[in-house]
Image: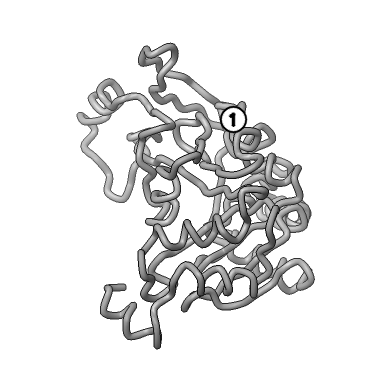
């Protein structure tokens, strides 16, 4: 969607103040822990672009709350598995050997969108250490949310997703769908169904030295997240609030309720699919 389309979709620009009002309408409260997945283009034309959205989100939760966003870096995944586009086989070892180490303070996100990338660089934003599935956070509990992010099972029990769950957090889907809802990954780890495991490695900095760390994980799968999310919204409407934020459809979701439902859903659906 181009800028002309964004202008044509709205009668007036979204601003920090109008976005804060819209966030209040969808139910965002001061002092809460809020995990945001967002699409800037879905909001229509915003005066100040991504920066205005980050400012509005911070103003909505205030510094007594905690704002969290994914800061994933697909450029540090296994290059032999890249498919969009694939790379020549004889490039793979060069990439592994030569890519610079992941640095939480400076490494850009990839595929997370303009809002998450803008938020990553904000003053007082901190970021977890995982080289592929890090999260950025700001506010009262930011350090605690991103601390000690385990390399192994990076979206599981020792991840910022679990920290949001433990704080009774909310998920804000801001112009996005459940297919991007990372909290559902936490349920993949908790649910009992057959899982394949994998190992990967990536370069990080340890005492200012480039070190390749190896970590194990389950093979996650987002192909049924949209169906799961639709069933969740039908089954537990009390856990989802809806309103427009700018020109975007926004959904504010009780994260623990979603994760608990998803555990049961996976155990009913993925177990059956594997039989």
Q: Quadrant of residue 52?
A: bottom left
The residue lying toward the viewer, choosing from 181 and 215, is 181
Does 9 sit left or right of 97 as displayed? right
Image quarter in which the N terminus is found: bottom left
Q: Position of residue 50 (x, y in %)?
A: 39, 60
Residue lying farthest bottom?
A: 11
- Per the image, the residue denoted by label 1 is 149
The residue lying toward the viewer, choosing from 216 and 249, is 249
Q: Position of residue 190 (x, y in %)?
A: 73, 42
Residue 172 shows in this picture: yes
10 Å neighbourhood of mark 1: few (<14), some, or many (≥20)?
Answer: many
The residue lying toward the viewer, choosing from 73 and 92, is 73
Scheme of image coloration: one colour
Does 59 sit left or right of 98 as displayed? right
Residue 128 sits above or below residue 41 on the image:
above
The residue lying toward the viewer, choosing from 239 and 263, is 239
């Amino acid at each position: 969607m181009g800028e002309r389309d964004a202008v044509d979709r709205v009668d007036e620009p979204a601003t920090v103040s109008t976005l804060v009002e819209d966030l209040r309408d969808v139910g965002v409260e001061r002092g809460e822990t809020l995990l945001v997945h967002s699409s800037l283009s879905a909001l229509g034309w915003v005066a100040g672009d991504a920066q205005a959205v980050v400012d509005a989100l911070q103003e909505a939760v205030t510094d007594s709350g905690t704002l969290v966003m994914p800061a994933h870096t697909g450029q540090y995944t296994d290059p032999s598995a890249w498919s969009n586009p694939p790379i020549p086989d004889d490039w793979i070892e060069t990439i592994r050997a030569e890519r610079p180490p992941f640095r939480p303070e400076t490494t850009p996100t990839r595929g997370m969108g303009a809002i998450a990338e803008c938020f990553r660089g904000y003053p007082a934003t901190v970021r977890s250490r995982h080289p592929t599935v890090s999260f950025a956070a700001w506010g009262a509990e930011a350090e605690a949310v991103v601390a000690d992010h385990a390399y192994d099972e990076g979206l599981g029990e020792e991840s910022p997703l679990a920290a949001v769950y433990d704080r009774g957090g909310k998920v804000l889907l801001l112009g996005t769908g459940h297919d991007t809802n990372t909290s559902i990954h936490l349920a993949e780890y908790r649910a009992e169904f057959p899982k394949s495991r994998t190992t990967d490695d990536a370069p990080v900095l340890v005492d200012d030295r480039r070190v390749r760390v190896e970590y194990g994980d389950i093979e996650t799968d987002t192909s049924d997240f949209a169906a799961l999310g639709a069933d969740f919204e039908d089954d537990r409407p009390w856990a989802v609030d809806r309103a427009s934020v700018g020109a975007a459809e926004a959904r504010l979701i009780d994260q623990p309720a979603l994760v608990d439902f998803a555990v049961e859903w996976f155990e009913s659906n993925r177990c059956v699919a594997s039989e």
